[in-house]
Amino acid sequence: MPSVRPIDVHVHPPTPEFLRRSGGQLVESALRYFGQDPQGSIDALIAEYEGAGLRGVLLGWDAETATGLPPTPNDLIADIVARAPGTFIGFAGVDPWKQDRAEAELERAVRTLRLRGVKFHPIAQAFYPNDPRFRSLFALCEALGVPALFHTGTTALGARLPGGGGLRLDFGRPIPYLDELAAALPRLTIIAAHPSWPWTGESLAMALHKANVYLDLSGWSPRYFPAELVQYANTLLQDKCLFGSDYPFLHPVRWLRDFDAAGFRAGVREKILATNAASLLGLPPA
């Protein structure tokens, strides 16, 4: 276990609201892809993170317009955070297609529920981040001073289903879609989630070029990271990379074990595991 308390910036609630009702066959396919069958216990989630000495960012979910499935309530995220406030902080989930209602929900989540950011999944939500119809929503994120985390690259949602469950991977391509948003709203902190394969180089270029873009390394075991990702995370992007697991699809202790053997330098390891996220989220790193 590292000498700092790691901050896992990519945690999904293992509850029926997310795993069954909000995700349906899409999340079920992802669980099969990762070989997981979680029991949906908040108590188990808290015990796992507290037992391993970890902190986590819990992510909300709302892809109702594109999928027809109900959202995971942001109130649930806030309730879990309230049960373990020293262990978790929360990010809201909002559906961009709801437009005015999405903006109202984001403001409520930040100002009333005290959530600290917002999560978007362009593939599941079927939108391009640079679509001008949603610019005011992202401008509100900027105005509220909260980071926006975007899924990038391929997804296990719908994996191995006919037609991928109807999901289109191009919504998750970093350039030009997310890069254009980063350029248009330079004070919006953007977290590009996952190694972005098959467009890993695009995320690396975006993070190198845009001061407001960070990379969340979740969803992959570090043993499978592309060599160029390890190279840049060890050098030019050592202050821009963040530990994330993608729980319950990939468990954090397994991610950390594989990270130990993935060739990251000692000084860089603590930045990726805790220091970078603590700075970005305004948390103490210890």
Image (cartoon, rainbow, N blue to C red):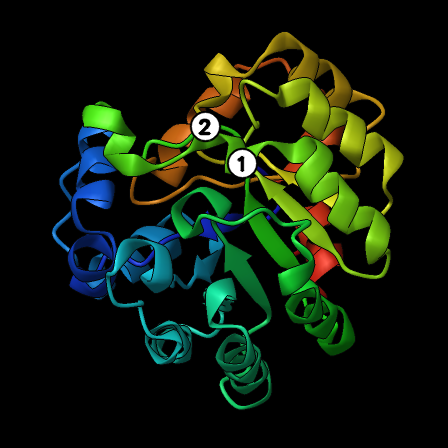
* Placement of 112 over or under 83, stated as above or below: below
Circle on res. 240: none
Circle on res. 172: 1
Name the image quarter holding residue 145: bottom right
Q: Are marks 2 and 1 in contact (CB under 8 Å)?
A: yes
To which residue does mark 2 refer?
154
Residue 266 visible in image: no
Cα distance between the residues tagged 2 and 1:
7 Å
Residue at image position (52%, 15%) is 261
Residue at image position (52%, 38%) is 171
Sequence-wise, the earlier of marks 2 and 1 is 2
> Tag count in the figure?
2
* Placement of 69 over or under 160, stated as above or below: below
Amino acid beneath label 1: Gly
Name the image quarter holding residue 33: top left
Between 102 and 93, the one lying in front of the other is 102
State the image coordinates of residue 185 (x, y, percent, origin top left): 82, 58
Residue at image position (63%, 63%) is 134
Residue 135 visible in image: yes
State the image coordinates of residue 139 (x, y, percent, origin top left): 74, 69
Q: Secondary structure at mark 1?
A: helix
Q: Is residue 246 left or right of residue 111?
A: left
